[in-house]
Amino acid sequence: MKRHALVTGGAGFLGSHLCDRLLVEGWRVTAMDNLITGDTANIAHHAGNPDFRFVHYDVTNYLFLPEKVDFVFHFASPASPVDYLQLPIQTLKVGSLGTHKALGLARAHGASFLLASTSEVYGDPLEHPQKEDYWGNVNPVGPRGVYDEAKRFAEAMTMAYHRYHGLDTRIVRIFNTYGPRMRLNDGRVVPAFISQALRGEPLTVFGDGSQTRSFCYVSDLIEGIYLLALSGEHEPVNIGNPAEMTILQFAEVIRHVTGSASEIVFRDLPEDDPKVRRPDISRARRLLGWEPRVSLEEGITRTIEYFRGRV
Ligand code: UDP
């Protein structure tokens, strides 16, 4: 009997890549998505695969799956700042009610559970780089609070199910990840700069571009998540690429790799935009023997190939 995984947000950017990996590893996969930010185009290549099933459903509603589930991967959520500003209530609901329902389903099936959490739990961090034992600096009532607090609640709920119900849980804190299947217009810096460069439009750097991020290619991230799922680790684990750069440097990388002559223009910095972000991945290295392998140049080149036909 093949193991059966439920992936909420399975038609999204990361959820769909996770479905691919699970199928390659010999799982049966049910992908659930309400498609408010996901897209069936991301999973269309599994049409006709008897090991794959798509369920169009909102995970914040009561969940019932008749077939035995062995692992629940809870990846549903708007995840770009622009998306969660436009969908603030849905973002809060999927992180809170959706996590509760997904945990409840895992418990009913005696399944393991993995929460896709985020570096946003560290907010605008006062410790750098960010280790898992840093509690963060989050503005609960700012525009990003809807995402940050929902994910912090989701982590608390996951640990409560682990401690109180003995559920076998994992928490991955995902740092900025990029690659094919990101939505061109999701507002995040990678699709924004690549589409601007390919169209010959100016690259819009927010603020003075001195804020930093650390970009991880999607295949590296999925590898870390799969290893975490197989591990017995219940505490949060950062998965991301520690190669940090300023957003201005990142704009230069995009111009270089696309060969674009686009100019760089400066726009207002969004409220509560974290000034720095870089994962400390010692825990992932120690527990999972994991580290990222794909260089920024290689990952961006693959991502550009995906976007080229779509701009
Ligand atoms: N950013 C930018 N120009 C854009 C989009 C984003 O300069 O067109 C900046 C944004 O202000 C942030 C960084 O790039 O400092 C990463 O933003 P993103 O939306 O990708 O995600 P975040 O890391 O803030 O969650």
Image (spheres, rainbow, N blue to C red):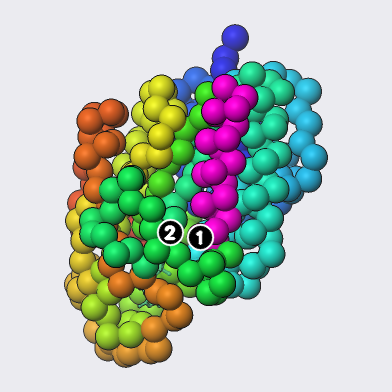
Q: Is mark 2 within 8 Å of ligand 1?
A: yes
Q: What element carries label 2?
A: helix
Q: Where is residue 172 in the image (x, y as percent from the top left)?
A: 42, 41
- Mark 2 sits on what residue? 120
Residue 74 in view in this figure:
no
Q: Quadrant of the N terminus?
A: top right
Could you tell me which residue is drawn at 40 percent across and 39 percent down?
236
- Judge whether 157 appears above or below 113 on screen: below
Nearest the camera: 183 or 156?
A: 156
13 on left or right of 101: left
Please state the extent of the stretch shown in magenta in the rendering: 147-166
Residue that label 1 marks: 148
Q: Is mark 1 on a helix, strand or loop?
A: helix
Across and down, in percent, residue 129 comes to 23, 56
Q: In this view, does 212 lie above or below 164?
A: below
Quadrant observed for ligand 1 in the rendered image: bottom left
